[in-house]
Image: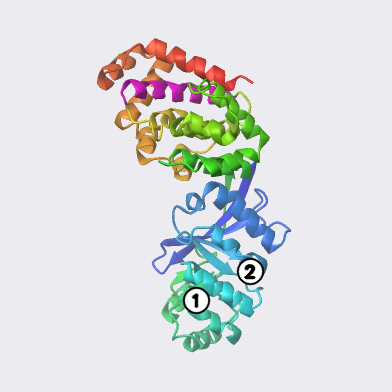
Amino acid sequence: MYGYIARQPIFDAAKTVYGYELLFRDGEANSFPDIGADEATSKLLMQHHLLLGVESITGDKPAFINFSADTLLHRFPTSINPTSTVIEILETVPATPELLAVCQSLHSQGYKLALDDHDFDPKWDQFLPYITYVKVDVLQFNLLQISRYLRRIAGYTLVLLAEKVETAEQFEKLKMMGFHLFQGYLFARPEMMKQKQVSSSKANLLALIAEASKVELDFELLAGICQRDVGLSYKLMRFVNNSQFAARQPISSLKLAMVSMGEPELKKFIALLALANLADGGVDERLTVALIRARFCDLLAVQKHLSNNPPSAFLTGLFSNVHEIIEQPQPVMLQQLPLQEEIKQALLAKSGLLGQMLQLCLAFERGDWEATLTLEQQISGIAELADVYQQAVRWADSILVS
């Protein structure tokens, strides 16, 4: 399933891209769907920001997103990063005391607000201390009307953004009037983008991976999550039974099962669970490969006496092909995962000891014996690679068995 989004660039006076206005679309026709503003905003955020990251769409430039009355009053904008997003207050939103309180609150939290299609009505003047951008539709008013209004609000520190700029003459006159940013067909039409969507449930699983990178885990929190999901409970018990901790003591609770595993093993479980669900729960061959690589790198780390908390070598192998499973470019995928920088560099550049271990696994996997021997010598202190690989395969099979 794909999510569609239109982005229209916003330029500065030098005609350099400053940011993008993001617009929800329902298909490749690049037309706005016949749905309400609240639903459009919700879909835009769910499909692109909360699941993939708006930054990946805007190239780390500010994203201007429309918010209607209900989404603002219910504080929906606080689910997004204030450094990456500008909250546009639609012209249809009533200027009520409740809205003013919301704007004051959002401003105090570091959010930048914009008045969209501003109509110059004095009722908005009380909002201006909390506003960063004022967007003016330059086709709706003549230049004299705009000039008079700008003189009236000259005492406020505002960034003026001209919308629907269609001619070079307009652009030059608006610059002289004090406009800082510009948007319109003179520069660019909305550009359609299509991205593979990650479902909400999968996005939650990706969030769980953050736990695998923490030094300390919240066992009560994790046990509570599993207790609400029978499938998670079953998978946890199965993972415990396949671990070296299975025979230590009878398991009477999920929390005890987690504690008996120890934090490094539990972190592996969290990452495995996330990856298995990203693969839609089936025995995807790519998932099998990921598990084998994870265990292979983990066993090498044991031989090298590397610290196992967080289990960096295991995570390096496990996430070596997750981008293929979720059909995202690896750099984009890694931006969304809270993995240690050492792991990210091992995955992207094959650098460091973790990168060498991953390279060794890949060389052994494809039967490149010359590269295998070279890497073996570079890493040093490891032995019996064939046995290590066989152990990894057996372990992966034990995890995947239903």
Q: Position of residue 337 (x, y in %)?
A: 47, 42
Residue found farthest to the right: 34
Q: Earlier in the sequence, mark 1 or mark 2?
A: 2
Residue that appears at 61% across and 51% down: 46
Q: Identity of the amino acid at label 1? A: Tyr
Write down the region rendered in magenta: 284-305
Q: Position of residue 220 (x, y in %)?
A: 54, 43
| Residue 155 left/right relative to 38 | left
Q: Position of residue 319 (x, y in %)?
A: 46, 32
Q: What residue is pinned by disc 2?
A: 73
Quadrant of the image containing the N terminus: top right
Q: Position of residue 181 (x, y in %)?
A: 46, 70
Q: Identity of the amino acid at label 2? A: Leu
Q: What residue is pinned by disc 1?
A: 130
Estimate the spatial distance between the alpha carbons at disc 1 and disc 2, rounded to whole Å.
16 Å
Q: Is residue 286 magenta?
A: yes
Residue that appears at 30% across and 14% down: 373
Q: Is residue 376 above or below residue 356?
A: above
Q: In the depicted view, which residue is nearer to us: 379 or 244? A: 244
Q: Is residue 222 magenta?
A: no
